[in-house]
Image (cartoon, rainbow, N blue to C red):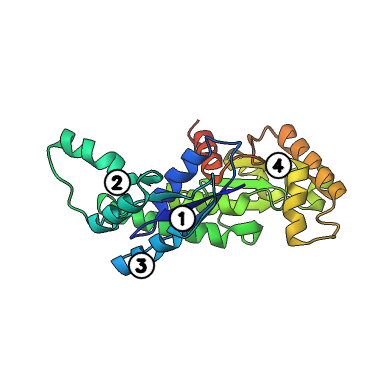
Amino acid sequence: MSTRVFILSDHTGITAGSIARALLAQFPHQSFTLEEHPFLDDMQKVEHIANEIERIDEGDHPPLVFSSFVDRKARSLLKERFADRLYDIFEAFTPPLEKLLGESVSPIAGQLHGISNTGLYTERIQALDYAMVHDDGSITRNYEKADVILIGVSRSGKTPTCLYLALHNGLQAANYPLVDEDLETTQLPPILRQYREKLVALTIEPKQLQRIRQQRRPGSRYSSPEQCEWEVHQAEAIFRKHHIPVIDTTAVSIEEIAVHITAEIMS
């Protein structure tokens, strides 16, 4: 039975969500269903979601609650209702930091942006724009500006990884899908040859690829086991032939893929 996990926040909830996923990933034999509830910015909303959680009766699998509320009243309410299954991100880290730094926190929702800077924000917005414009090989004329160009077969994880690299790392990431014409020759497409040093390849197990494609185009040649097997085999032959670093996306998160890619870029 899957355990329901509520991620609650008075802001975006990105921090609580990231930490929850990292922690729950350490329990691979458990099944979790995550429900995210951001912008719970008044006590009425907090009371409503707390009541909803309390009504859930799942026997030996009570719902878990991860929260990143800055508001102390909201944190107190959740602690009172769910003390035995609440994982309060700020409660875990702010008291020892206050003691070490000799200063009490000044709670403001969304304060994370205050430790950033306008230049970094602008850089990430520009990187996001670049990733969207250069998605799926639609435009290739500005590849010289790319920090990295991801290549791989369709549905191997290129687009979400590019968007993640843009938003979290400020990297200008393009992606280029290898189609049948490229795969038949086992040669790099001409447009990519001059950017060989920028290329990082994504691969995936054929069975997993087939499952993903079946959801998109069920019963088609595109989603057939034979086509998926052939495409992955041919793509990996190209990667080996041209000595392109490869990351297997079958069983890893986008965050992990991004870490591997940034390591490749820096190496």
> Mark 1 or mark 3, which is nearer to you?
3
The residue that label 2 is drawn on is 90
Q: Earlier in the sequence, mark 1 or mark 3?
A: 3
Q: Is residue 239 left or right of residue 53?
A: right
- Residue 172 visible in rendering: no
Q: Earlier in the sequence, mark 2 or mark 4?
A: 2
Say what secondary structure mark 1 lies in: helix
Q: Is residue 139 left or right of residue 46?
A: right
Q: CA distance from mark 3 to mark 2?
A: 20 Å
Q: What residue lies at 39% left-to-right and 60% top-to-bottom?
A: 50
Residue furthest to the left in view is: 102
Badge 3: residue crowd in 10 Å (few <14, some 14–19, many ≥20): some
Front residue of this view, candidates 209 and 75: 75
Which percent across, then down, holds residue 56? 50, 57
| Amino acid type, label 4 | Ile
The residue that label 1 is drawn on is 127
Q: CA distance from mark 1 to mark 2?
A: 30 Å
Which percent across, then down, holds residue 109? 27, 58
> Mark 3 or mark 2, which is nearer to you?
3
User: Are discs 1 and 3 less than 8 Å apart at CB?
Assistant: no
| Amino acid type, label 3 | Lys
Badge 1: residue crowd in 10 Å (few <14, some 14–19, many ≥20): many
User: Are discs 1 and 4 less than 8 Å apart at CB?
Assistant: no
Which percent across, then down, holds residue 182? 78, 49
The residue that label 3 is drawn on is 45
Say what secondary structure mark 3 lies in: helix
User: Are discs 3 and 2 less than 8 Å apart at CB?
Assistant: no
